[in-house]
Amino acid sequence: RNIENIEYLQELKDLVSKLSIKDVQFQRSISDEMRSRLMRNALCVVYTPHLEHFGIVPIEAMYAGTPVIAVNSGGPKETVLDQQTGFLCDDNPEAFYSALSKLVKNPTLSTTMGAA
């Protein structure tokens, strides 16, 4: 196991505790079947790597019929159709919040984008 991943997982758990966020589950080393099920049932997939050369995660999400919210750089610029199959955002929390809130406020939009 990668020590960096272990440390990051602990940081996330600490943040959840600090912010008193309920109903958070961290899943490690999930099966392909479980990953597919989670993607199919998600409101969206948030993909944050900046300047990722390709990134398979957005492709997997769109294949599952789930819209993607991603940084407007690198591979997602080639795969995510902004406002159609998801949202391409500036690399800042406010932009991601804006995109995510559109889907939370209008889950039908998620279904429409997922079918595009």
Image (spheres, helix red, strand yellow):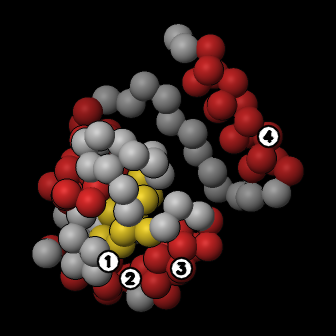
Disc number placed over residue 99 in the picture, else none: none
Q: Which residue is mark 2?
A: 107
- Determine the CA span between mark 2 and mark 4: 29 Å
Q: Residues within 10 Å of mark 4 (few under 14, many from 20)?
A: few
Disc number placed over residue 110 in the picture, else none: 1
**Depth check, front residue: 90 or 13:** 90
- Residue 20 lies in what quarter of the image? bottom right
Disc number placed over residue 98 in the picture, else none: 3
Of callouts 3 and 2, which one flags the residue occurring earlier in the amino acid sequence? Answer: 3
Look at the numbered discs 3 and 4 and tell me whether their residues touch, using CB distance below 8 Å: no
Look at the numbered discs 3 and 1 and tell me whether their residues touch, using CB distance below 8 Å: no
Question: Can you say whether 52 is above or below 67 in the image?
Answer: above
Q: Secondary structure at mark 1?
A: helix
Of callouts 3 and 1, which one flags the residue occurring earlier in the amino acid sequence? Answer: 3
Look at the numbered discs 1 and 2 and tell me whether their residues touch, using CB distance below 8 Å: yes
Describe residue 115's horizontal placement relative to residue 50 as left or right. Answer: left
Q: Secondary structure at mark 3?
A: helix
Of callouts 2 and 4, which one flags the residue occurring earlier in the amino acid sequence? Answer: 4
Q: Residue at x 61, y 73 (%)?
A: 94
Residue flagged by tag 4: what amino acid is it? Asp
Residue flagged by tag 1: what amino acid is it? Ser
Whether residue 58 is visible to the viewer of this picture, yes or no, is yes
Q: Residues within 10 Å of mark 1 (few under 14, many from 20)?
A: many
Residue flagged by tag 2: what amino acid is it? Pro
Residue 72, percent from left and from top? 38, 62
Question: Can you say whether 69 is above or below 105 in the image?
Answer: above
